Image: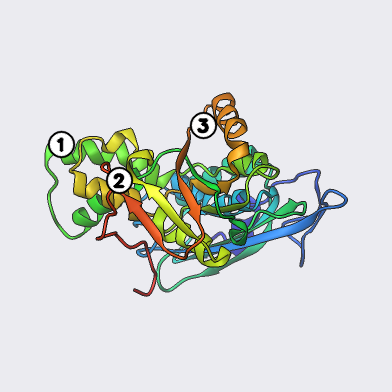
């Protein structure tokens, strides 16, 4: 019967020239560019809490790394390597083959090789922990640098992941979806299970943006982190927020909730001076990535969202909180 070290050798040992000592020793040793510093981030994914048990393991491998790469993107850091901690109830070779393939494919795309980690038997379902390392040059992109008068931008489009999650939760609770709801789930589920980390955008923003955050827990909540850290306020126009085309047909109330409060998006929300507006638009056009101007940073400490008639919306959705 295959054991722990067979599992590591078979699925998680990849050689790369940038790593002097990698998987299989007590520590990893890797190179970074001269004059740079290390940015690092960790995320924990639990079966039943962060992902459904029937998720395609290839997509799970992708997402496990993507959510961490998204953090590097928000810091303007270039990925250099990652660690994987994996707790499994049993040795399932086909599951491991799919999971590792999804993980390694995204790692190769972003130059972020797996350089170490740990495996163990879990008594409470699958547990995944990923730690990423990136090289970064000062001045760093942080949440605390927004300035009064800055434009507020968001990349990509919002809402689809939240709609998919809502539909999957209903299925989990035993509900039977209608035909149109099944079609909606098929259109939105990829946005939940295969997010695209905006690493290249983060690197491009290093000399343009002031404050940056990735939208993991909801646009308003994550923008709120920027405002709190920067001691600033903001005015956001609902009509300017990019809505994912997959949810065009949902009700206005559900769409508003999904766009303003829905998490698992992993797009970047950032602030930048008005003088950078044309450069940012040009950057979006050249990369093919939608970059939308959605509001302005203000001097106060309030976050206001205005509707299509520029009237302040009072009943705003909250974002995700693990313990709420």
Quarter of the rendering occupied by the C terminus: bottom left
| Rendering quarter of residue 229 | bottom right
Give the colour scheme shown.
Answer: rainbow
Query: How many callouts does the rendering have?
Result: 3
Under tag 1, what secondary structure? Answer: helix
Residue drawn 39% across the image and 63% down it: 47
Specify the label residue 289 is tagged with: 3
Query: Which numbered mark, 1 or 3, is in the foreground of this view?
Result: 3
Badge 1 is on which residue? 180
Relative to 97, 208 lies left or right: right
Relative to 285, 77 lies left or right: right
Q: Which of the marked residues, 1 or 2, is nearer the chain's N terminus?
A: 1
Distance (Cα) linking label 2 and label 3: 27 Å
Q: Nearer the viewer, residue 69 or 123?
A: 69
Distance (Cα) linking label 1 and label 3: 29 Å
Q: Position of residue 165 (x, y in %)?
A: 30, 52
């Amino acid at each position: 019967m295959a054991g722990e070290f067979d599992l590591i050798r078979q699925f998680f040992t990849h050689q790369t020239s940038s790593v002097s000592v990698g998987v299989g020793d007590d520590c990893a040793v890797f190179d970074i560019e001269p004059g740079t510093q290390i940015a690092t981030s960790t995320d924990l994914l639990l079966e039943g809490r962060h992902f459904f048990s029937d998720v395609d393991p290839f997509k799970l491998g992708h997402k496990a790394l993507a959510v961490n790469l998204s953090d590097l993107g928000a810091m303007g850091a270039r990925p250099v390597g990652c660690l994987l901690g994996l707790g499994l109830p049993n040795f399932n070779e086909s599951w491991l083959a799919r999971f590792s393939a999804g993980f390694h494919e995204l790692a190769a795309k972003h130059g972020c090789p797996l350089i170490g980690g740990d495996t163990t038997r879990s008594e409470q379902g699958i547990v995944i922990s990923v730690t990423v390392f990136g090289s970064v040059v000062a001045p760093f992109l942080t949440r605390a640098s927004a300035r009064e008068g800055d434009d507020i931008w968001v990349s990509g489009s919002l809402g689809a992941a939240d709609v998919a999650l809502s539909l999957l939760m209903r299925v989990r609770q035993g509900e039977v979806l209608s035909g149109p709801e099944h079609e909606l789930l098929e259109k939105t589920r990829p946005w939940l299970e295969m997010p695209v980390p905006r690493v290249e955008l983060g690197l491009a923003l290093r000399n343009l943006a002031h404050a940056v955050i990735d939208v993991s827990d909801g646009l308003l909540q994550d923008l709120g982190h920027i405002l709190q850290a920067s001691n600033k306020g903001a005015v956001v126009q609902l009509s300017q927020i990019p809505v994912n085309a997959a949810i065009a047909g949902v009700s206005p109330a559900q769409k508003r909730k999904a766009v303003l409060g829905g998490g698992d998006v992993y797009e970047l929300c950032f602030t930048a001076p008005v003088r950078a507006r044309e450069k940012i638009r040009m950057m979006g056009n050249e990369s093919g990535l939608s970059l939308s101007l959605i509001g302005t940073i203000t001097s106060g400490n309030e976050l206001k969202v205005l509707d299509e008639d520029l009237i302040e919306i009072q009943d705003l959705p909250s974002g995700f909180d693990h313990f709420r």
